[in-house]
Amino acid sequence: MPLGFTLVELVAIIMIAGILAAVAGPRFFNPSTFAARGYTDAASGLLRYAQKLAIARHAGVTVQINSSGLALCATTANPCADANPWPGPQGETPYQIDVPGGVSLAGSAASVSFDSQGRPNAEVSLTITGDTVRTLTVEAETGYVY
């Protein structure tokens, strides 16, 4: 008994594949979707790293926030002077992440500073806009980033 597909089954499969391609395809081919999500994850990681670095070094650590990206610094002066950057997890100095093309960054403050116990100086919200608007928040009392 031969195994195969009927013409009706093949046409149905082609129709379903066409509908999926029309609906899901643009999401996969829009680079700002992945860039915005990736930048949100990187920004969250940088903020958490800054908090952990402040605790480990028993010293204040500041994250500078501007429209071009985030940078790790030892002082609150914005922009961070060349003499005051903190190293990144791989030893890179200065440790900063730049906003990719098609994505924008806005913060509720120009910087957030973590004290030696990992507490931020104030609650800060970062708005990252790409395909959708994503918000990162640093809690005022605990420094929790979400």
Image: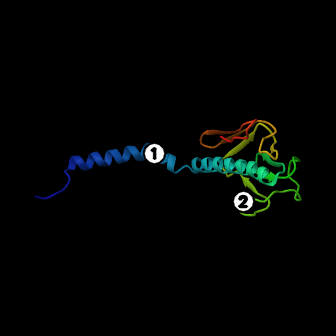
Q: In the image, which disc is placed on residue 89?
A: 2
Is residue 69 among what the camera can see? no
| 95 or 60, nearer to the observer | 60
Is residue 77 among what the camera can see? yes
Badge 2 local density, few (<14 within 10 Å), some, or many (20+)? few
Label 2 vs 1, first from the N-terminus: 1
Q: In the image, which disc is placed on residue 128?
A: none
- Vertical comparison of 127 with 39: above or below: above
Q: Along the horizontal axis of the image, is 78 left or right of 104? A: right
Q: Amino acid at mark 1?
A: Ala
| 84 or 119, nearer to the observer | 119
Residue 105 occupies quadrant? top right
Tell me the residue at 51%/46% (across/down): 27
| 111 or 22, nearer to the observer | 111
Q: In the image, which disc is placed on residue 24?
A: 1
Q: What is the CA distance from the residue labelled 2 to the residue labelled 1?
A: 37 Å
